[in-house]
Amino acid sequence: MSQLESRDATDTDDELVVGTDTSATGEHTVRSTRWMLVGLAAVVAAVIGFLALSGDGNDGELEAVSAPEQTTTTAADSTTTVATAPQGPATFVADATLYIDENSPIEEGTYRVDTLGTPFSVTVGEGLFVQPNRRGQFVLTHQSSQGPDDRDIVMLRLSSLSDPAQPDFGLDTYRMAWPTDLGEGWPADDFSDWLDNLSDQIVVSNRQDTILGGLEATRVDLYLGETACSTTGSFCMLFGSNHQIDTKMLNLGSTYRIWVVDQDNQDPLAVIVGINREADRDWFDTADAILSTLAFGEIAPNPMELMPAGQVELPFLGGIRTELAEQAVAFRNLDSHSTIRPAEWPADTDFLASPVGYGGNVLDTPDNVVTELEDSGLVVIEIESVVIDGIDARVFDIAGNSSRPSLKRTTDDNTGWWAPARGRTWLIDHPDRGLLMITSEAFTDVDNVFPIILAQTESIIESLEFIDLE
């Protein structure tokens, strides 16, 4: 049985669902886009020609990366109100409001977050913004943050750390840092030895064993000293990764306060506070006040799991059994939305139960889904139908570049389901589970990537059975 099957400590019907307000302001849209572009660029650089990790990516190699431009911050930009630090250790508030939004401001209050697998509660004040809040990553920033290291608090599940002796190795050929078997890299649960073996290119200070959120942790401050970055783009060194899907980089000119939190026999958690200007050093005080209210609940597995090749049982679409031709990473974004991603390609096999139209209407027939996809600007072409575990499935090729999400994953989903640049969708009208959707998705370099992800998806579908998981 996989960890995903048994992971019930923090799963809820609302897990990682984004709220109902879809009218983001222009300022927030620009800020969120900058954060998302950095993540997208990292994915592109990982596989497609090892492109630069800035903007849309540029070819070429830089011997060094300049320190970030020192820009003026106004008082309005810098002010953040935080809750008063508690007098004693914080206690996990299990019945706090479950925070399910991302890429949006967060109101003052106490919240529970389940995104990391292990749940936590935290109290925040005004002037803060949540960036990604999904698949083992939660990022809280100042409301005017323009990108990674600009007054952020990154909480990330770690499956692996970089090579401490060569943290700059592999950024311009990213896959070499973690070979495709994913068994290499420094063990994530060996942070102390990682620090002991760390290259002197990274300056270490204030190292100590401590407690964060009620759990044992190692705390350290890191700063990149005299360093020639072997990379393209603005990133300089690699810190760690969660199965190569979410990765934390270290940048020249930035300062970090890092806690790696013990999770017994599960993948540890990293909490990384960053600034990229000395003028913003008071952000560390803000972060300390926020983190003094942090309390973890019961330890739970990493929500992203590396699945071996062979037969697997997963809680997708109400429960499935299938065969994986090769190892892949599996994760749930929501109870209704799950993903299998191959180890070597930035492409997905997506599983969506009871899809919802962009306007919030539940879609109960394949024709309704097709109409929604076409309304979002996609070209949809029906091809020959297939049978999946004894049930007829209609099959459609889709292509295009939509300016908005094509579907919602739940009625209160603000992020939405974004259609791939090229994909194939299987729509199954299941007699007991309702309308189910499986999609093979390629977002970049589609001529090369799509045939690979399509072969994976077809292999999954050929062996797929609908089962009841205990």
Image (cartoon, rainbow, N blue to C red):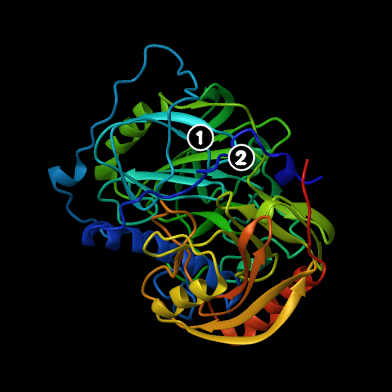
Check contact, mark 2 vs mark 1: CB within 8 A.
yes
The number of numbered discs placed on residues in the rendered structure image is: 2
Q: Residues within 10 Å of mark 2 (few under 14, many from 20)?
A: some
Foreground residue among 413 and 224: 413
Q: Whole-percent x and y of residue 58? A: 44, 79
Q: Whole-percent x and y of residue 262? A: 63, 31
Determine whether, in the image, residue 119 is placed left or right of residue 460. Answer: left
On screen, residue 28 above or below 125: below
Disc 2 marks a residue whose amino acid type is Leu
Foreground residue among 171 and 224: 171
**What's the residue at 44%, 61% (across, down)?**
416
**What's the residue at 39%, 54% (across, down)?**
148
Q: Quadrant of the N terminus?
A: top right
Determine whether, in the image, residue 176 is placed left or right of residue 137. Answer: right
Q: Quadrant of the C terminus?
A: top right
Q: Is tag 2's residue or tag 1's residue first in the polypeptide sequence?
A: 2
Question: Helix or strand or loop: what does disc 1 sit on?
Answer: strand
Foreground residue among 71 and 338: 338
Disc 1 marks a residue whose amino acid type is Val
Q: Can residue 400 be seen by looking at this rendering? A: yes
Which residue carries the number 1 mark?
220
Per the rendering, the mark at residue 195 is: 2
Asked which quadrant contains residue 425, the reply is bottom right
